[in-house]
Image: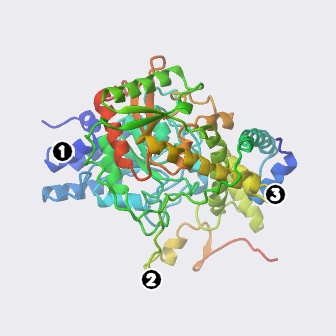
Amino acid sequence: MTPTGSELSALSLREAGAGIAARAVSSRDLVEAALARIAETDGRIGAFLEVTAERARAAAAQADQRAARGERRSELDGVPVAVKDLFAMKGVPTTAGSRVLEGWKPPYDATVVERLEQAGAVVVGKLNMDEFAMGSSNENSAYKKCANPYDLSRTPGGSSGGSAAAVAARQVAGSLGTDTGGSIRLPASFCGVVGLKPTYGRVSRYGVVAFASSLDQVGPLARSVEDVALLLSRIAGHDPRDMTSSPRPVDDYLAALEDGARGLRIGVPREWLQSGVDAGVERSVRAALAVYEQLGATLVDISLPHTKYGIAAYYLIAPAEASSNLARYDGVRFGLRAEAKGLKEMYAETRERGLGAEPKRRIMLGTYALSAGYYDAYYLRAQKVRTLVRRDFDEAFEVCDVVAGPVSPTVAFPLGTKTQDPLQMYLGDVFTIPCNLAALPGMSVPCGLDAVSGMPVGLQLVGRSFDEATLLRAARALERELGALPPPEGR
Amino acid sequence: MALSLEQVRRIADLARLRLSADEERIFAEQLSAILDHVRQLEELDVTGVPPMTHALAAGEVSPMREDADRPGLTPQDALAGAPAREGTCFKVPRIIE
């Protein structure tokens, strides 16, 4: 019997790939089902900035020809996915969510896009995001609103809001996002999907529009831990075109996936469950920790004393780097140019018209923090505090294998509630930022629905450097015990 | 710590941003609040703490790429997204009068 479109849309990446291998479904059917689902639901969700239907159909036809010959490039061959609109795709508009790049078509592919396509995955579109990945609610997108599939009046989280919403709404089974201060884990948590930020250096950033270069990292989102592991396996690994990419061999992320939580030492930072965390979030997180104990893991009380300073350090370091990275949007080589008389006027006019409030705010903050007379007091001090945050984790990993706590102090909040107060928005990143500052791998895995709002809650797991395998194993153990979240109703 | 409008204008000029009068006022207020928050870093004694100047893991090195010629972008590809060009050059407003 031929599966229906909604059945195809509910398949995991693994199931879809296996279906193609068994010739039970075609890549064409899967891609058409994804395109139909996007057409039907995206008016309400707003996850896509660009749908690459023609390119996807052509790729699907090739995948089906390979399947007919019995060839398989990977488990993902022929399977539809989508990527945050921060990744360069040759000839496909790439905006970074900003007007300053409206209409720009990159002359090359990002390494991660190239790797996905080499594995046979079919990219069906580019996903909505906060402008230049700056934001925690997707409300800084210069193009359109993105809604949380669990409640359309709430934020999907940011900055990879479209990447999480598209997966939760079953438009695609897997996506790529980026995480500079929580931008994969926060939307994953808000939308009830699994998201992983790999260790700094594990995945190439070549062809990824830069925000804060000492923090940015690319990672996968999907509805299951296994699918996240599959995607990570495809994108991880050394890339000579990214100087920060690590030459270490990539672990087999699937090998230990089902090994369970027995024997794991799970560190629970005191500072992460103190006041300020919503009751519903705390309840779900504590319940997940209890599950780990039942599964034979040991909970270890740890301290990450510099947690509260993370936001302050981050909101100096990230804007400082952004002020430098965004200097390239000057109307000369690509993107928008506003006509003006002199060169300096052209720069200012172009940036005035092309950049939204949040990038401007961060450029201002970063320029100030780096300017003569303030460098030592702000940027240098923040880098020293970054060392202290990293040392907190070094000490913690002496006594535990994984750190666990909430992703965010709250569930997804209603759209429009924090847009007037940037500092309030920044404070929501308190638990995700330390992992970026310390350059460690981190995940969000669903651990329940908040009883009051019905919104998903994510458990954050942070691991040792390059130990994504243990993170995935721990996440899988919880997922197996809790089962999948109920899908967003009627959407 | 409150940033003056004067300081906001100075930073905007350094960053090649042009702000409206409204933006200047709002940014002065918002940036002052953010700077107040980041001042809590002053509570910490960072004597003898080295700054974290890169994010590579302990012992990680960036291998140097072999110094070999490789194909790059063609001038046509590199110029394809340029707002204005002339021949194989990016065209900009006149700099020297």
Q: Nearer the viewer, residue A153 or A29?
A: A153
Residue that badge 3 annotates: A373
Q: Are the residues at dot 1 and dot 2 in contact (C-beta closer than 8 Å)?
A: no
Left or right of A271? Residue B97 is right
| Inter-mark Cα distance, 3 to 2 | 43 Å
- Residue type pointed to by label 2: Asp
| Residue depicted at 41% across the width and 53% down the height | A466
Q: Secondary structure at mark 1?
A: helix
Q: Are marks 1 and 2 on the same chain?
A: no
Q: How far from the left and from the top, in percent, is residue A67? A: 17, 55
Judge whether A313 appears above or below A145 on screen. Answer: below
| Residue depicted at 79% across the width and 47% down the height | B20
Left or right of A165? Residue A338 is right
**Mark 1, chain letter?**
A
The image quadrant of residue A461 is top left
Can the viewer see residue B40 in this picture? Answer: yes
Judge whether A291 appears above or below A72 on screen. Answer: above
**Mark 3, chain letter?**
A
Q: Are marks 3 and 2 on the same chain?
A: no
Closer to the eye: label 3 or 2? 3
Q: How far from the left and from the top, in percent, is residue A164? A: 43, 39
| Residue depicted at 57% across the width and 60% down the height | B54
Can the viewer see residue A340 in this picture? Answer: no
The image quadrant of residue A169 is top left
| Inter-mark Cα distance, 1 to 3 | 62 Å
Tell me if mark 1 has few (under 14), some (14-19) or many (20+) residues whose alpha carbon lies within 10 angstroms of its own.
some
Q: Secondary structure at mark 2?
A: loop
Residue that badge 1 annotates: A19
Q: Earlier in the sequence, mark 1 or mark 3?
A: 1
Residue that badge 2 annotates: B69
